Amino acid sequence: MIAYLIGTVAAVAEKKVVLDVNHVGFQLSVSDRDIRSMPQVGEEVKIYTYMSVREDAISLFGFLRKDELELYRMMINVSGIGPKGGLNILSVLSADDVRLAVLSDDAKAIAKAPGIGNKTAQKLILELKDKMKLEDVLDNIAREDDRQTDDTLEAVRSEAAQALSALGYSASDALRAVRKVKVTAEMTAEEVLKMALRVLL
């Protein structure tokens, strides 16, 4: 099994990238999100891989982040998802967004992915919810955003997210909106709420 590839980007197309590894071209299927983050042609990149073996084809799926590969493996084990379905979900949602949607029972957010209906999204939530922890997701978000884990700031964010939920927004939409607001020590929850509403409107 190929765990990852390190090579030069040779070509980038819709949902596809060709990676030159020691003069051997590997074609990988990748999400739209990773396509947008892919280095320019000629630059080096490390791509984590999943190999799908069927009777009629062997396909490689690539991910720029290891945690996306780990989530992808969990998702494709759910009946009705499959390798392409898992990639479609990660094309519209980041790994952390998927986890937030699962933990907040937000089937609507997952069902935005092409080919994923509401019933399949609900099944994904049902099968994966017990395998995920909100604390782990929040830790990932904090590391990615490179923000200080100050208790006061976290309390303000949490209060703003709860207020958005009370206004009728899903928990995952509320958390995503609050994450996009650059919170400072001087800001109140009401100020964060107003800025997060601008993101959502």
Image: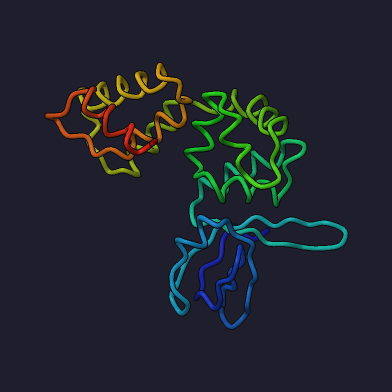
| Tally of numbered discs | 0
Question: Is 55 situated left or right of 26 in this image?
Answer: right
Q: Residue at x 37, y 33 (%)?
A: 139
Compared with 5, 179 (above or below) is above
Q: Residue at x 25, y 29 (%)?
A: 192
Compared with 43, 111 (above or below) is above
Q: Nearer the viewer, residue 122 or 147?
A: 122
Residue that sits furthest to the bottom in the current view: 23
In the rendering, at what x and y percent does residue 140 appear? 40, 38
Q: Quadrant of residue 164?
A: top left
Q: Nearer the viewer, residue 57 or 120?
A: 120
Compared with 42, 105 (above or below) is above
Q: Nearer the viewer, residue 23 or 40?
A: 40
Q: Quadrant of residue 109?
A: top right
In the rendering, at what x and y percent does residue 16 appear? 61, 66
User: Which quadrant: the N terminus?
Assistant: bottom right
Q: Nearer the viewer, residue 104 or 139?
A: 104
Q: Residue at x 72, y 62 (%)?
A: 59
Question: Is 102 situated left or right of 169 in this image?
Answer: right
In the rendering, at what x and y percent does residue 190 appear? 23, 22
Question: Is 68 situated left or right of 162 in this image?
Answer: right
Residue that sits furthest to the front in the current view: 201
User: Which quadrant: the C terminus?
Assistant: top left
